[in-house]
Every structure is written in structure tokens, then in C-alpha cells.
Image: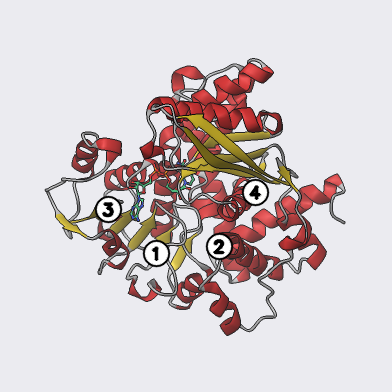
Amino acid sequence: MILAVGSRYKRVCQHNLPYAALFQEAKSMKAFEATQYFFDTAADRLKLSESTREVLLMPKREVQVQVTIERDNGDLATFVGFRVQHDNSRGPMKGGLRYHPEVNLDEVRSLASLMTWKTAVVDLPYGGAKGGIGVDPATLSVRELQALTRAFVDQIHDIIGPDTDIPAPDMGTDHRVMGWFRNQWEKYHGFNPSVITGKPVEEYGAKGREEATGRGVGTLTVKLVKRLGRKAEESKVAIQGFGNVGTHTAKYLADAQFPVVGISDATGTYYDPEGLDVHDLLRHSLTQPRGALTGYKNCEVLPVDALLSLEDIDVLIPAALGGVITSANVDSISAKVIVEAANGPILPLADKRLNERGVTVLPDILANAGGVTVSYFEWVQNRQHYRWSLDRVRQELDRTMNDAFEGVWQLAQEEQVSLRTAAFMIAINRVRRAAELAGSVI
Ligand code: NAD
């Protein structure tokens, strides 16, 4: 089902609003508005016209579909699925599939737009998209999860393809889901593993894809801390989330001699001021349903939301949900460095406050771009029918992330803006230039 897009995209965060009024709005700010605010801050520096902003912000296409499956007990269950294709000026659109009860059109739209800026900031030849289903995958059996994925593909396969829109894993989906997705898509269109990335390694997946986002977060955290003149051993880290991104980030930083003192997941905050044994936590999580930390006893256990306000933290890494750092809790954060491993964890009002307090924020569109970068490597390998070694994947990932970081850092110094604004400026300029060359904007 294609939904027409129109005047409801009239932009809401105009910069001629007094800050107080803007931040009054921020309390109820939706995800898409938050992304738009960050976009506008950079677009103001670039003196972008109103009409160019409209072209760059409005998604190309939004699709909402009904996804119905037969449950194991014979009942029918119906869910809502989305795919938002934001921009394809720089290449086929790319973005994850999220299975989570809170997935909604506004969130998917915001994440699709973030993907456009993310692929541009690390200079991949892609645009941005995102999709998902409003479902708690933990409530489904493996058979139901597979049926759900296949039913979703039945609804959207026409708009997905290796040269148009290439999905990947995100929260609640993994290599198995990607494998089912590919298999169902190929029933309509024939063999072509490059239609989706994040596949099982033995089924045309890339070595190193699973660790890629966490490795990228880790690499840039090491670089940023060094650039700020701090030592790894003296920089205490707290990580929110212990899923794909959180575990690989924790492992990378612990191996790089950072004391990781706090880790939270949906079951609690696990804390040791002397530094947690990350490998021990990982071993424990492998024994628990869905990798949770429940029952871990070798440290203090605090409530889930205690992590963000832990005292004496140097580096905070939100690696779970969006919108977790708000005006309400921003002043309880002690960290001087925040690395956004999750998508959209800081709302605009909180971001402004952090800037005022001199906290350095490494923005999501750069910090967590390692996943889409290795997805790109997987797509390249699939198209060439050639496999890279893990060493090559890591080397190329580290080079891509380092180059992007240097570009953003340098522009931030030159323009005296935050790393987020610099990252958006670079990304917007690249997308605008591609659209100009294609004749889509003047
Ligand atoms: P995941 O589903 O593997 O893990 C999510 C983790 O967050 C789990 O440990 C869960 O227990 C925890 N969590 C849930 N609610 C929490 C709460 N209230 N407090 C603390 N922890 C909580 O997801 P993931 O793939 O690791 O993704 C995490 C974030 O990173 C998301 O924002 C996602 O969009 C972003 N991201 C992921 C990738 C990727 O390659 N997986 C790439 C880029 C960005």
C-alpha cells in the first residue's frame, strides 16, 4: 500500500522560533522532528534554501502494510509493517528492519532519514531507508517469526531489490531473519543474495558483519578519547544495552584497556566501580534466554535506568533505545564524552544542554556507521561472487571509519560547531551535490 506524502511534511522546527518555544515543543517531540532539528541546524550553517530542505527531507516513498500470520495455536494474528524509502540521490537505499512493539511510522521515517545522512557521512554509494514491524519478537515462536518475515516480504517485495532498496538487521532481527527474507524475495525475483545484507556467513553473509557496529563504535571511541587528550585506562565507560552493538562495543573497549564499570540491559544495571569483567558477563549472558544478564552475581545490580546517572563516568555509550537522554535527565549525566551507538538516543534539548556543558557527543550517523559499512562490503562481495577475509573486512572498516572521523573532526574545528553539526553538514552537502548533478535540485 503506497501512502501519498504531502503537506504533512511541512517542516515543524523553524529556526526563527525562539529557543524557549522550540524546547517547549521538544517535550513532546517526535523522532522525525528531532532528526529534522539536527538537519536544520546544519542546513542553517550551509545556508540551504527552504525549497532544497523540503526536497532533501521529504521521504521518496512510505509504505504501510498488513502482515497476517497463523499462530501455532491456529489463531490469526495481524501486525503492521512499514518501509520508508527516504532518499536515493547517492545510490540504492539502504536500511535495517526492526521488529519491536513500539515501531511506528514516525520512528521508521526518522530512522530512514538518519540512514541517508549516515551513508553519506561515511561516503558509501547508498541512500537511506528503514523498515519494521510493530511486534515483540519474544512473543513469537521461531516458526511464527519466520512466517511473519515471509508474509512481510510478500507485501513489499516489489519495492525491494539490490539496485533499489537493500534491507539489513536492526533491533529484534538477526541473520536468520535476513536469510528467510532473502529466500522469500528470491521466490519472486530469482537468485540474488545482494538483495539483503546481514545474512548468515555461510549463506553469502560477510565475515565481521555481526561485530561491525560495535567495532566501529569501539574504534572511534578510542580515537576520540585520545584526541581529547585522555588515557584509555583512566576513562571509565558505561554502556546502555548489551545486545549486538553493546556486547561488541564492551568487548572492544575492555580489550583496549578501558575500565567498563557499568553495563545495563532490559533486566538491570550491572556495576563495578573497579571495572566489570566483560568476558565473564558475556559468558553469563550466553546461558540466559535472549542473552540477558539476569542472575549475574559478580557485581552490584542496580535498577535499569540507574546507568545513565552513574557518577564518575567519563564515557557514556547509549547502545539500546532512541530518545533516552532528554531535558529531564540530562543534568544527571556525569560523562564528559557521549558516543551515540544507538540511533537517536539524545533529544535536541538535551543535546543543546550537553553542548553548553562542554560534553563532547559523537553523533549516531558517524558513531554507529560500522554496521552499514560492512553491509556495503557484503553487498560488494555478493555482486562480485567473491569473499573477503575477516582481516580485510576489519582493515577496510577501520579505514572507512577513521577517514570519516577525520573529515568530521576537521570541519568541526574549522567551523567551530559540534561534531553532530559537522557530520550533518558533510552528509547534507554530499546528498545535495548528488541531487544537483542528477538535476533534482537547482
Ligand atoms: P539488540 O536488540 O541486539 O539489543 C538491544 C539491547 O538493549 C538488549 O540488550 C536489551 O536488553 C537492551 N535494552 C532494551 N531496553 C533497555 C533499557 N530500557 N535499558 C537498557 N537496556 C535496554 O539491538 P542492537 O542491534 O544492539 O541495536 C541497539 C541500538 O543500536 C539500536 O538503537 C539500533 O538501531 C542501533 N544500531 C544497531 C546496528 C546493528 O548493526 N545492530 C547498527 C546501527 C545502529
Crowdedness near tag 2: few (<14), some (14–19) or many (≥20) residues, C-alpha within 10 Å? many
Would you name the residue on which mark 1 appears? Answer: 337
| Disc 4 secondary structure class | helix
Measure the alpha-carbon separation of dots 4 and 3: 30 Å
Above or below, comparing residue 303 to residue 386 in the picture: below
Amino acid under disc 4: Thr
Amino acid under disc 1: Val
Measure the alpha-carbon separation of dots 2 and 3: 25 Å
Above or below, comparing residue 374 to residue 344 in the picture: above
Q: Residue at x 39, y 56 (%)?
A: 318
Would you name the residue on which mark 3 appears? Answer: 263
Dots 4, 2 in contact, CB < 8 A: no
Would you name the residue on which mark 4 appears? Answer: 116
Above or below, comparing residue 297 to residue 20 in the picture: above
Dots 2, 3 in contact, CB < 8 A: no
**Mark 3 or mark 1: which is in front?**
3
Measure the alpha-carbon separation of dots 1 and 2: 13 Å
Nearer to me, 318 or 373: 318
Of the residues under marks 1 and 2, which one precedes in the sequence?
1
Of the residues under marks 4 and 2, which one precedes in the sequence?
4
Task: For the N terminus, give its image quadrant.
Answer: top right
Nearer to me, 39 or 399: 39
Q: Is residue 110 left or right of residue 146?
A: right
**Mark 2 or mark 3: which is in front?**
3
Q: What's the mark number on residue 420? A: 2
Of the residues under marks 2 and 3, which one precedes in the sequence?
3
